[in-house]
Image: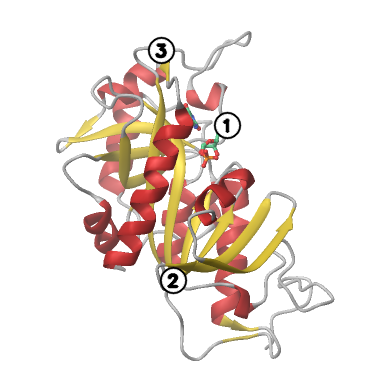
Amino acid sequence: MPIKESELILNPDGSVYHLNLKPEHVAKTIIFVGDPDRVEKVTCHFDSIEFTTHKREFKTQTGYYKNKRISVISTGIGSDNIDIVLNELDALFNIDLQTRQPQKTLTSLNIIRVGTSGSLQKEVPVNSVLVSEYGLDINGTLQYYITDKINNSSIENEFVKQTQWHKNKSKPIAIKSSEKLFKIFSNTNTFSGITVTANGFYGPQGRVLRLPIQDPEINSKLEKFNFKDLKITNLEMETSGIYGLAALLGHQAISLNAIIANRPSGTFSENPSKVIEELILYTLNTIVEQI
Ligand SMILES: O=P(O)(O)O[C@H]1O[C@H](CO)[C@@H](O)[C@H]1O
Ligand SMILES: O=c1cc[nH]c(=O)[nH]1
Protein backbone atom coordinates (compact mmCIF):
# COMPACT_ATOMS: atom_id res chain seq x y z
CA MET A 1 0.00 0.00 0.00
CA PRO A 2 1.38 3.43 -0.89
CA ILE A 3 1.81 5.88 2.00
CA LYS A 4 -1.22 8.22 1.92
CA GLU A 5 -1.01 11.87 0.89
CA SER A 6 -2.07 12.94 4.39
CA GLU A 7 0.85 11.00 5.97
CA LEU A 8 3.73 11.83 3.65
CA ILE A 9 2.91 15.34 2.49
CA LEU A 10 4.61 16.69 -0.61
CA ASN A 11 4.59 20.28 -1.87
CA PRO A 12 3.33 21.02 -5.43
CA ASP A 13 6.94 20.87 -6.69
CA GLY A 14 7.39 17.37 -5.21
CA SER A 15 9.54 18.48 -2.26
CA VAL A 16 8.87 17.22 1.29
CA TYR A 17 6.42 19.36 3.25
CA HIS A 18 8.49 21.24 5.88
CA LEU A 19 12.05 20.93 4.64
CA ASN A 20 11.23 21.93 1.03
CA LEU A 21 13.79 19.42 -0.22
CA LYS A 22 13.92 16.87 -3.05
CA PRO A 23 16.26 13.84 -2.90
CA GLU A 24 18.86 15.39 -5.22
CA HIS A 25 19.27 18.40 -2.90
CA VAL A 26 20.78 16.53 0.05
CA ALA A 27 24.18 14.90 0.67
CA LYS A 28 24.59 11.69 2.67
CA THR A 29 26.65 13.51 5.27
CA ILE A 30 24.54 16.12 7.00
CA ILE A 31 25.36 18.66 9.69
CA PHE A 32 22.44 19.71 11.90
CA VAL A 33 22.55 23.10 13.61
CA GLY A 34 19.80 24.62 15.72
CA ASP A 35 20.00 28.23 14.61
CA PRO A 36 19.22 28.99 10.92
CA ASP A 37 21.90 31.72 11.06
CA ARG A 38 24.47 29.05 11.94
CA VAL A 39 24.01 27.33 8.55
CA GLU A 40 26.06 30.00 6.78
CA LYS A 41 28.62 30.01 9.58
CA VAL A 42 29.33 26.45 8.39
CA THR A 43 28.93 26.88 4.64
CA CYS A 44 31.04 30.06 4.52
CA HIS A 45 33.96 27.62 4.70
CA PHE A 46 32.72 25.62 1.67
CA ASP A 47 34.49 25.81 -1.70
CA SER A 48 31.12 25.88 -3.47
CA ILE A 49 27.41 25.86 -2.65
CA GLU A 50 25.06 24.14 -5.11
CA PHE A 51 21.71 24.48 -3.34
CA THR A 52 19.96 26.68 -0.77
CA THR A 53 16.40 26.70 0.55
CA HIS A 54 14.66 28.06 3.63
CA LYS A 55 11.20 27.42 5.08
CA ARG A 56 10.21 28.30 8.63
CA GLU A 57 13.15 27.36 10.90
CA PHE A 58 14.50 24.82 8.40
CA LYS A 59 17.29 26.30 6.28
CA THR A 60 19.37 23.95 4.11
CA GLN A 61 22.54 24.47 2.09
CA THR A 62 24.43 21.77 0.20
CA GLY A 63 27.90 22.15 -1.21
CA TYR A 64 31.49 20.97 -1.20
CA TYR A 65 34.12 21.34 1.49
CA LYS A 66 37.51 20.02 0.29
CA ASN A 67 35.81 17.75 -2.31
CA LYS A 68 33.33 16.28 0.22
CA ARG A 69 29.65 16.88 -0.50
CA ILE A 70 27.96 17.99 2.73
CA SER A 71 24.51 19.36 3.58
CA VAL A 72 23.83 21.68 6.50
CA ILE A 73 20.28 21.87 7.86
CA SER A 74 18.96 24.02 10.69
CA THR A 75 16.49 22.20 12.92
CA GLY A 76 15.29 25.12 15.00
CA ILE A 77 14.81 24.50 18.71
CA GLY A 78 13.52 21.30 20.24
CA SER A 79 12.85 17.61 19.72
CA ASP A 80 9.47 18.32 18.10
CA ASN A 81 11.43 19.76 15.19
CA ILE A 82 13.82 16.81 15.21
CA ASP A 83 10.82 14.54 14.64
CA ILE A 84 10.04 16.52 11.48
CA VAL A 85 13.60 16.78 10.22
CA LEU A 86 14.58 13.13 10.74
CA ASN A 87 11.37 11.72 9.26
CA GLU A 88 11.42 13.99 6.19
CA LEU A 89 15.14 13.53 5.65
CA ASP A 90 14.80 9.76 5.85
CA ALA A 91 11.84 9.87 3.44
CA LEU A 92 14.02 11.66 0.87
CA PHE A 93 16.43 8.72 0.80
CA ASN A 94 14.38 5.73 1.85
CA ILE A 95 10.92 6.28 0.36
CA ASP A 96 10.28 6.50 -3.37
CA LEU A 97 8.35 9.79 -3.48
CA GLN A 98 6.66 8.83 -6.79
CA THR A 99 5.32 5.41 -5.77
CA ARG A 100 5.12 6.35 -2.05
CA GLN A 101 6.66 2.97 -1.17
CA PRO A 102 9.77 2.33 0.94
CA GLN A 103 12.91 1.85 -1.15
CA LYS A 104 14.10 -1.75 -1.52
CA THR A 105 17.66 -0.74 -0.69
CA LEU A 106 17.96 1.59 2.29
CA THR A 107 20.50 4.41 2.59
CA SER A 108 22.25 5.11 5.89
CA LEU A 109 23.13 8.77 6.51
CA ASN A 110 25.83 10.34 8.68
CA ILE A 111 24.23 13.00 10.89
CA ILE A 112 26.40 15.31 12.96
CA ARG A 113 24.78 17.88 15.26
CA VAL A 114 26.81 21.02 15.92
CA GLY A 115 24.93 22.56 18.80
CA THR A 116 25.23 24.64 21.94
CA SER A 117 24.63 23.35 25.44
CA GLY A 118 24.84 24.08 29.16
CA SER A 119 27.22 22.00 31.30
CA LEU A 120 26.10 20.41 34.56
CA GLN A 121 29.61 19.59 35.76
CA LYS A 122 32.12 22.15 37.10
CA GLU A 123 34.93 20.28 35.33
CA VAL A 124 33.23 20.69 31.91
CA PRO A 125 33.89 24.42 31.58
CA VAL A 126 32.44 27.02 29.26
CA ASN A 127 34.15 27.12 25.85
CA SER A 128 34.83 23.38 25.88
CA VAL A 129 33.48 20.81 23.41
CA LEU A 130 31.43 17.83 24.53
CA VAL A 131 30.64 14.72 22.48
CA SER A 132 27.40 13.11 23.72
CA GLU A 133 27.93 9.40 24.39
CA TYR A 134 24.24 9.01 25.28
CA GLY A 135 21.16 11.16 24.77
CA LEU A 136 18.58 10.96 27.56
CA ASP A 137 15.06 11.91 26.46
CA ILE A 138 13.11 13.59 29.27
CA ASN A 139 10.91 15.40 26.74
CA GLY A 140 8.55 12.60 25.70
CA THR A 141 9.18 12.52 21.93
CA LEU A 142 10.63 9.01 21.78
CA GLN A 143 7.74 7.62 23.85
CA TYR A 144 5.67 7.76 20.65
CA TYR A 145 7.96 5.23 18.89
CA ILE A 146 8.96 1.65 19.71
CA THR A 147 12.35 1.96 21.34
CA ASP A 148 12.67 -1.28 23.27
CA LYS A 149 15.42 -2.61 20.96
CA ILE A 150 17.59 0.51 21.14
CA ASN A 151 17.18 2.02 24.63
CA ASN A 152 19.27 1.44 27.75
CA SER A 153 16.83 0.62 30.55
CA SER A 154 19.59 0.25 33.17
CA ILE A 155 20.49 3.93 32.77
CA GLU A 156 16.80 4.90 32.71
CA ASN A 157 15.93 2.97 35.89
CA GLU A 158 18.95 4.35 37.73
CA PHE A 159 18.01 7.86 36.57
CA VAL A 160 14.44 7.52 37.87
CA LYS A 161 15.76 6.18 41.18
CA GLN A 162 18.59 8.65 41.76
CA THR A 163 16.57 11.74 40.79
CA GLN A 164 13.26 10.57 42.36
CA TRP A 165 11.81 11.37 38.93
CA HIS A 166 8.20 12.53 39.34
CA LYS A 167 5.65 10.03 38.00
CA ASN A 168 3.77 12.75 36.08
CA LYS A 169 6.84 13.59 33.97
CA SER A 170 7.49 11.55 30.82
CA LYS A 171 9.48 8.34 31.36
CA PRO A 172 13.14 8.93 30.43
CA ILE A 173 14.63 7.03 27.47
CA ALA A 174 18.41 6.64 27.08
CA ILE A 175 19.91 6.09 23.61
CA LYS A 176 23.56 5.55 22.71
CA SER A 177 25.33 7.54 20.02
CA SER A 178 26.79 5.92 16.92
CA GLU A 179 29.85 4.09 18.25
CA LYS A 180 31.69 4.74 15.00
CA LEU A 181 31.06 8.49 15.01
CA PHE A 182 31.66 8.77 18.77
CA LYS A 183 35.18 7.35 18.28
CA ILE A 184 35.84 9.57 15.27
CA PHE A 185 34.85 12.83 16.99
CA SER A 186 36.25 12.18 20.49
CA ASN A 187 39.81 13.21 21.32
CA THR A 188 41.90 14.20 24.31
CA ASN A 189 40.50 17.74 24.23
CA THR A 190 36.81 16.78 24.13
CA PHE A 191 34.56 15.82 27.05
CA SER A 192 31.91 13.14 26.90
CA GLY A 193 28.96 11.88 28.93
CA ILE A 194 25.18 11.64 29.04
CA THR A 195 23.37 14.60 27.47
CA VAL A 196 19.91 15.25 28.89
CA THR A 197 17.51 16.54 26.23
CA ALA A 198 14.82 18.74 27.74
CA ASN A 199 11.59 20.07 26.26
CA GLY A 200 12.22 23.66 27.27
CA PHE A 201 15.02 26.04 28.22
CA TYR A 202 13.74 27.33 31.56
CA GLY A 203 11.64 25.10 33.88
CA PRO A 204 12.55 21.87 32.01
CA GLN A 205 16.27 22.72 32.46
CA GLY A 206 15.84 23.70 36.12
CA ARG A 207 16.00 27.46 35.50
CA VAL A 208 13.97 29.68 37.80
CA LEU A 209 13.20 33.27 36.81
CA ARG A 210 9.79 34.12 38.29
CA LEU A 211 8.14 30.70 38.29
CA PRO A 212 8.88 28.04 40.90
CA ILE A 213 9.55 24.57 39.48
CA GLN A 214 8.32 21.09 40.46
CA ASP A 215 11.78 19.96 41.68
CA PRO A 216 14.15 22.81 42.63
CA GLU A 217 16.90 20.24 43.35
CA ILE A 218 16.77 18.61 39.91
CA ASN A 219 20.03 20.07 38.54
CA SER A 220 22.07 19.05 41.57
CA LYS A 221 20.56 15.56 41.28
CA LEU A 222 21.57 15.45 37.60
CA GLU A 223 25.05 16.67 38.53
CA LYS A 224 25.45 13.89 41.13
CA PHE A 225 23.99 11.09 38.96
CA ASN A 226 26.42 8.23 38.44
CA PHE A 227 25.96 4.99 36.53
CA LYS A 228 29.07 2.81 36.21
CA ASP A 229 31.18 5.99 36.09
CA LEU A 230 28.97 7.57 33.42
CA LYS A 231 27.94 11.10 34.38
CA ILE A 232 25.27 13.46 33.15
CA THR A 233 27.34 16.23 31.64
CA ASN A 234 25.00 18.66 29.95
CA LEU A 235 21.51 19.86 29.04
CA GLU A 236 20.16 20.86 25.65
CA MET A 237 17.09 20.25 23.49
CA GLU A 238 17.73 17.95 20.47
CA THR A 239 20.29 15.16 21.04
CA SER A 240 18.09 12.31 22.31
CA GLY A 241 15.59 12.79 19.48
CA ILE A 242 18.38 12.64 16.92
CA TYR A 243 19.93 9.54 18.52
CA GLY A 244 16.60 7.73 18.90
CA LEU A 245 15.18 8.39 15.45
CA ALA A 246 18.56 7.86 13.73
CA ALA A 247 18.98 4.49 15.45
CA LEU A 248 15.42 3.41 14.57
CA LEU A 249 15.77 4.50 10.94
CA GLY A 250 19.26 3.03 10.46
CA HIS A 251 21.39 6.19 10.38
CA GLN A 252 24.62 7.07 12.21
CA ALA A 253 24.37 10.10 14.50
CA ILE A 254 26.60 12.08 16.83
CA SER A 255 25.95 15.27 18.79
CA LEU A 256 28.79 17.75 19.31
CA ASN A 257 28.15 20.49 21.82
CA ALA A 258 29.85 23.83 22.29
CA ILE A 259 29.49 24.41 26.03
CA ILE A 260 28.37 28.01 26.43
CA ALA A 261 26.94 27.91 29.97
CA ASN A 262 28.13 26.24 33.16
CA ARG A 263 25.14 25.76 35.43
CA PRO A 264 26.87 24.82 38.74
CA SER A 265 29.14 27.88 38.57
CA GLY A 266 26.45 30.13 37.06
CA THR A 267 28.73 31.31 34.25
CA PHE A 268 28.13 32.00 30.55
CA SER A 269 30.77 32.17 27.81
CA GLU A 270 32.07 35.68 27.13
CA ASN A 271 32.48 34.80 23.46
CA PRO A 272 30.20 31.91 22.42
CA SER A 273 30.80 32.59 18.70
CA LYS A 274 34.48 31.67 19.13
CA VAL A 275 33.90 28.15 20.52
CA ILE A 276 31.12 27.56 17.97
CA GLU A 277 33.44 28.60 15.12
CA GLU A 278 36.20 26.32 16.44
CA LEU A 279 33.71 23.44 16.69
CA ILE A 280 32.51 24.05 13.13
CA LEU A 281 36.05 23.89 11.73
CA TYR A 282 36.85 20.80 13.82
CA THR A 283 33.66 19.13 12.53
CA LEU A 284 34.28 19.94 8.88
CA ASN A 285 37.90 18.80 8.92
CA THR A 286 37.08 15.61 10.83
CA ILE A 287 34.34 14.80 8.30
CA VAL A 288 36.75 15.26 5.41
CA GLU A 289 39.51 13.22 7.03
CA GLN A 290 37.49 10.37 8.52
CA ILE A 291 34.00 9.98 7.07
O1 LIG B 1 22.30 26.17 19.63
P1 LIG B 1 21.34 25.04 19.30
O2 LIG B 1 21.90 24.09 18.31
O3 LIG B 1 19.98 25.56 18.90
O4 LIG B 1 21.14 24.20 20.67
C1 LIG B 1 20.74 24.70 21.92
O5 LIG B 1 20.31 26.06 21.91
C2 LIG B 1 18.88 26.14 21.93
C3 LIG B 1 18.43 26.88 23.17
O6 LIG B 1 19.01 28.13 23.26
C4 LIG B 1 18.36 24.70 21.89
O7 LIG B 1 18.09 24.33 20.57
C5 LIG B 1 19.53 23.95 22.48
O8 LIG B 1 19.58 22.59 22.19
O1 LIG C 1 21.97 25.98 29.06
C1 LIG C 1 21.78 25.81 27.84
C2 LIG C 1 22.64 26.38 26.87
C3 LIG C 1 22.36 26.16 25.54
N1 LIG C 1 21.28 25.42 25.21
C4 LIG C 1 20.46 24.87 26.14
O2 LIG C 1 19.47 24.22 25.78
N2 LIG C 1 20.75 25.07 27.43
Above or below for 224 versus 6: above
Disc 2 residue crowd, few under 14, some 14–19, many 20+, Cα 10 Å: some
Mark 1 and mark 3 lie on one chain; the one further toward the N terminus is 1
At a point 53% along the width and 44% down the height, the residue shown is: 140
Please give the label number shown on residue 109: 2
At a point 27% along the width and 19% down the height, the residue shown is: 122
Q: Nearer the viewer, mark 1 or mark 2?
A: 2
Q: Is residue 172 left or right of residue 42?
A: left
Q: Quick one: quadrant of the N terminus?
A: bottom right
Secondary structure beneath label 2: loop
Which amino acid lies under the numbered mark 2 shown in the image of this protein? Leu
Please give the label number shown on residue 144: none
Q: Which residue is mark 3?
A: 266
Q: Point out residue 40 in the picture as x, y percentages from the top left corner.
A: 58, 51
Foreground residue among 274 and 192: 274
Secondary structure beneath label 1: loop
Please give the label number shown on residue 200: 1
User: Under 8 Å from ligand 2: the CB of mark 1?
Assistant: no
Q: CA distance from mark 1 to mark 3?
A: 18 Å
Which amino acid lies under the numbered mark 3 shown in the image of this protein? Gly
Foreground residue among 13 and 288: 288
At a point 33% along the width and 20% down the height, the residue shown is: 221
Residue 131 appears in the figure: yes
Mark 3 and mark 2 lie on one chain; the one further toward the N terminus is 2
